[in-house]
Amino acid sequence: MIPLEQAQAEVLESCRPAAAVEVATSEALGLVLAAEVRAPEPVPSFRNTAMDGYAVHSDDVAGASPQAPVRLRVVGTRPAGTAGMFSVGRGEALRIMTGALFPDGADAVAIVEETRTDGDHVEILAPALPGVHIRPAGDDIAQGQLLFEGGTVLGPGHLGVLSSVGASAVRAFRAPVVGVLSTGDELVEAGVDLQAGQIRDSNRRTLLSLAQRDGFGVVDLGIARDDEVVIERALVSGATVCDAILTSGGVSMGDFDYVKTVLDRIGKMSWMQVAIRPAKPFAFGTIGDTPVFGLPGNPVSSMVSYELLARPGLRRIAGHVDSDLRRRAIRGFVAGQGWRGARDGRTTYVRVVAEFAADGKLKVSSSGGQGSHQLYAMARANALAVTPPGLDIADGDPVDVLVLA
């Protein structure tokens, strides 16, 4: 057996970022920036008011109060979004709305709640301090300011900032397209009556969904029957249209499997036994320049293998920085019945339900059966508890947790 870190290193060595492309900002959610972005213009681009009220001279209203209001002549109204020149003189006020261009001459805002209208005049009922409630040009973002470094994963807030500075497109790594292939005469789709010895194909749907969840494009390569010609045609075809391929099953040592035979012939593959439970068998290699991940056939093993081995490689193709390829472990505490660590030198990834307790600590409990075939318990789990070999875990013990959802 080899350590998980060794298998991950081999995967990451062969996975390289996809080509950087120009992407419309509206289509860039979840993508990774390929280059830094600087602001082409300031935000806001002009001095404006942060409150509804009146633009005034602060000296005019320094002594204003409800008992001794200051009466000013209103010289106009400026809603947000309107241009035109206004200059406010002494003894004057300009009615102004939030976000509107602030006029020359004035240096303060008398907020509407502290005013009283009287025909073409306004009475100011409180002092207005100079500069308060006035946003200078570039108050949020200065022109030329570094907004985001290359390697930034673009979320909704990032896209809002890019839109605010008029950046209609960015240079980003395109999301990889992942093909998923199932193989085996025993597999059937939903809607077909099961015959003796047949099983439903759940792995393909699961892996397609995992890839979609992680922001990758997907191609369903279907089910290939146990025929070398059919399997080779599916793999070669997939390698021409996909950035990576996921298969499940046929990667255990000593197994006779058509997938292994075909991949050894058309690709450059490593067949590994990784010191983890579940998901010990794992294959990785390339068909041409296309990475191929051979995941175990048991459904839980397939999912755990994806999380620990395939996902980091796919994220590298998507342009994620090294520190963001793997899920980070956080400290949790076992609530309820514990579990035993493996006695065969493997690290166990226990499927758990994780939630924050009232004391702020992350508490985890087993999600159910821990067999590699027990997909229902994996579906209930939202985290994996990392259990070193030979270590028994009891109620209240600390444990490293990889949060999946």
Image: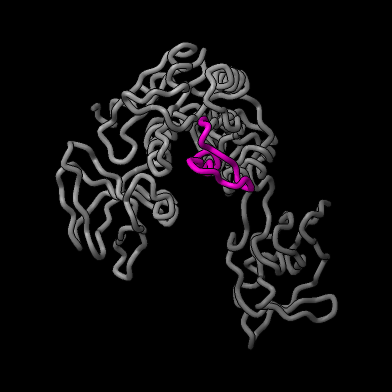
Q: Nearer the viewer, residue 76 or 193?
A: 193
Task: Name the residue located 30 percent from the left edge and 45 percent from the top edge.
Answer: 349
Q: From this viewpoint, which residue is outermost toward the front?
A: 196
Query: Number of marks in the image?
Result: 0
Q: Is residue 207 magenta?
A: yes
Percent position of residue 314, x then y: 48, 30
In the image, 265: left or right of 90?
left
Quarter-of-image position of residue 355: bottom left
Q: Residue at x 30, y 60 (%)?
A: 365
The answer to which image quadrant residue 175 occupies is top right
198 falls in the magenta region: yes
Residue 182 at what x, y percent from top left?
53, 32
Residue stretch in magenta: 183-208
Residue 354 vs 144, above or below: the answer is: below
Residue nearest the viewer, comparing 94 with 36: 36
Residue 249, quarter of the rendered image: top left
**Which quadrant would the N terminus be assigned to in this image?**
top left
- Residue at position x 35%, y 21% from top? 271
Vertical comparison of 220 with 102: above or below: above
The vertical placement of 54 against 82, above or below, is below
Q: Is residue 27 above or below residue 59?
A: above
| Camera sees residue 126 | yes
From the viewer's perspective, tell me whether residue 193 is left or right of residue 284: right
Residue 268: x and y in percent read: 43, 13
Question: Where does the image place residue 108, in percent across and percent down from the top left?
Answer: 64, 63
What's the coloring here?
A: one colour
Closer to us: 253 or 153 = 253
Q: Is residue 103 visible?
A: no
Residue drawn at (18%, 36%), measured in percent from left and top?
A: 345
